[in-house]
Image: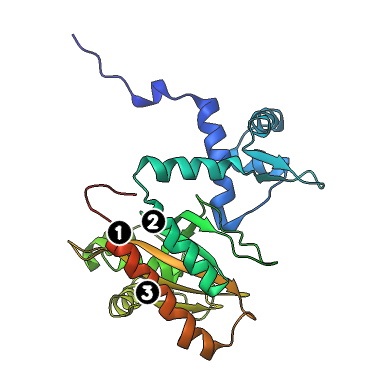
Amino acid sequence: MSIALSDDKYMVNSLRNGLLLMELFNDNGMTEMSLSQIAASLNINKSSAYRLLFTLEKMGYIKRDSNKNYQLDIKVVDLSYSYLSSTSFKQEAYAVMEQLKNDTGTAVHLFTLDGIDIVNLQNIQPSGNFISSILPGLRWPAYATVIGQILLGSLSDDEIRQRYNDFTDWKTYSDATPKDLEELLEAVEHARKKQHLTSWQKFNNDMIACAAPVKNRASNENIYALSISCPVDTFTRDYFEQHITSLVVESANKLSKIYKPESSW
């Protein structure tokens, strides 16, 4: 007689807690946390949290600053490179993004949609003093970002309604943030008609961004969103709209030509 086993029986709690710990830094754009914050967020005692942090620090995934707060370390980026490589990420795609960085002097990002979140897959830092805090693995709410609205645009309205059926945390980041599902559907419909969307202090109040879809040309589905970001005082609004956004669209179109359905990135 076969016995049905619960999947939870095979859960390694220490590994689970270590992964959940690293995911904490994706929540609400958190870049650093104290031992107490981490323990409380994971609902574990400080001793257990410290052992997790000690292990991850020794392995290069976590680091401590001078104030004894914890941050993700560079090895997390190595994981993202491995992921992208394992999913046939094309070297020529990276070259397109690198060229966009050189042409605009901005940080360049590649995002995908995961449920109702957008997830950063790649970040290319700009030259100069500005350093983007967007690291691979960073999650943001799709509804609140132009990137997310572009990626949601490939879903039907029914699918969007289903995904947001139980969603209640409609946090407002600016007057452009959708406040409920109906406003989100309006924003997504607007995104479907555009080659790009600009966020001028709409999500991060000191930043500007532009995003354009990377398409599966066979299905016309928005597979990824290519975006750039920079401090708000980098460009005038007119210059940004007249000269920078077209470079983003051009680069996204190049990535669409590179993408092949049979070998995802």
Disc 2 to disc 1, how far (Cα)? 8 Å
Q: Quadrant of residue 221?
A: bottom left
For marks 2 and 1 on the same chain, the one whose residue lies earlier in the sequence: 2
Callout count: 3
Q: Is residue 33 above or below residue 199?
A: above
Label 2 packing within 10 angstroms: few (<14), some (14-19), many (20+): few
Identified by mark 3, the residue type is Glu
Amino acid found under the numbered disc labelled 2: Glu
Looking at the rendered image, the quarter that the N terminus falls into is top left
Tell which of 238 and 183 is nearer to you.
238
Distance, label 1 to label 3, CA atoms, is: 13 Å
Q: Nearer the viewer, residue 160 or 73?
A: 73
Q: Earlier in the sequence, mark 1 or mark 3?
A: 3
Residue 241 located left or right of residue 189: right
Any part of residue 255 in sight: yes
Query: Disc 1 residue type?
Result: Ile
Residue shown at 25% from the left, 54% from the top = 260
Q: Which residue is mark 2?
A: 92
Cα gap from disc 2 to disc 3, whole angstroms: 15 Å
Q: Measured from the top left, where is residue 184 in percent x and y?
A: 36, 73
Residue picked out by circle 3: 250
Task: Answer left or right for 166 relative to 206.
Answer: left
- Residue 217 drawn at (x, y percent): 21, 64
Reply above or below: 125 against 88.
below
Q: Closer to the camera, 261 or 209?
A: 261
Indicate the position of residue 171 as horizontal and vertical percent values: 51, 67
Write the residue at 42% across / 71% down. Answer: 211
- Position of residue 53 relative to residue 165, above or below, is above
Residue 258 disc label: 1
State the image coordinates of residue 76 (x, y, percent, origin top left). Answer: 56, 42
